[in-house]
Amino acid sequence: MSEMPKGRAPDPTGPTPPTTPPTATSGPTPRPQPQPPAAVLRDPGFCRHSTGHVAVVEWDADTGWSEPAIEPYAMLSMDPATLGLHYGQAVFEGLKAFRAEDGSVSLFRPADHGRRLGLSAARLAMPEMPAELFTRTCTALVAADAAWVPGGYGQSLYLRPLLLGTEADLGLKPSRLARCVFLAYPADPCFGNDFRPLAVSTATETVRVVRGGTGESKCAGNYAAGLLTRTRAQAAGYDEVLWLDGIERRWVEELSTMNVFFVWDDEDGVRVTTPPCDGTIVRGLTRDSLLTLAGDLGLRAAEEPAAIDTVRDGIRSGRLTEVFACGTAGVVVAVSRLGTGDEDLTIGDGREGPVTGRLRNALLDVQHGRTPDKHGWLLRVDTAGDGTEAGAPADGAHADRSGGRHA
């Protein structure tokens, strides 16, 4: 990718809102792209087909952030001494754009994703991109690739922003240069659009993060630290790993790529819980959205610690009726079986439970514009290039106004 022009230094008082809505012309006009094959949009899989575009934003410690540019998808060229490659200054995000039944396209909570990228970057001594610039860059990329947004229920255009320290220097220090590359792919949910329940193995011998570390950051090293255990679990017939806290090996935290929820059958009704974010769990925006939607559906929902022994006892007694995982890539998917080292436990009858299905449908209905966006999570994108829709909240709500707890 070509080198980017350096932008003006950031305003210390904070980002200034744009005077005009973001449009597809934010940055250079993208090269014309062929229409995506119909077969790709019908069955995209998860991130198998790039749109052929990326958006790029550069940062320099002396001059600040550049304006976004839309470029052809290409190999990255960098010095072998790049700091991010040696010392792990690499963080990323994952967010989606959805097509509604009327053909319009909207991003889901882009400013909240931008703020979370900033939190991840700050933890690794990297520059924090203003949420306004992040949102404007996502909007420009989606506008350029609007034809690649599939229309199936649960399908989306998946965006993967990657922020990497790019200064060439082998000294251990924060990079004074950074590049953020935004990739785009038409996508089904990562575990499939049939939402087949998952078999999950509890990590009993290894830990991924500890309190005070980088657990709530979406940094590359957190995911690398879980790959060995996840690979072993998959070889043993499981789909994913359920991580416990790194001190007592007792408290449930999250899956490798998703938050976890529990559905309890109490004497006074159904209760939905998820472990609290205390520095070791990624603050998932799907998780946050589900906590809100559960209240909308009349369900009692709360953040509560869950000991693995309590979870096992609940499954055995039948009081724990459902377990499900959630994240941007996977949406909401039931957990049917939990391996805990010395036994395998089937949750309920091994099929998806009613609460899991209700919450997933409630989320997808908002994302696809089937129900009103009363929480202001959708940001409509101008896909016609006339600026009439860009930056406009769907259904007249205030765009992306809610804060996030954890994709």
Image (cartoon, grey):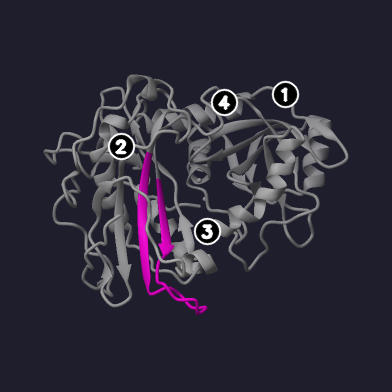
Nearest to the eye among marks 3 and 1: give it: 3
Task: Name the residue at the left extreme.
Answer: 386
Percent position of residue 285, x then y: 48, 47
> Which label number is shown at residue 350?
1
Say if mark 3 contacts mark 1, CB within 8 Å: no
Q: Considering only order in the chain, which callout, 1 or 2, is on the residue closer to the N terminus?
A: 2
| Residue that badge 3 annotates | 219
State if disc 1 and disc 4 touch (CB < 8 Å): no
- Asked if residue 183 is among those painted magenta in the image, a careful observer would answer yes
Residue tagged 2: 106
The amino acid pointed to by label 4 is Phe
Disc 2 vs disc 1: Cβ atoms closer than 8 Å? no
State which tag comes first along the sequence, 3 or 2. 2
Which label number is shown at residue 195?
A: 4
Mark whose residue sits in front, 3 or 2: 3
Report whether 40 appears left or right of 396: right
Residue at the image point whose x is 18% and y is 45% from the top: 23
* Label 2 SS: strand
Amino acid marked by disc 3: Cys
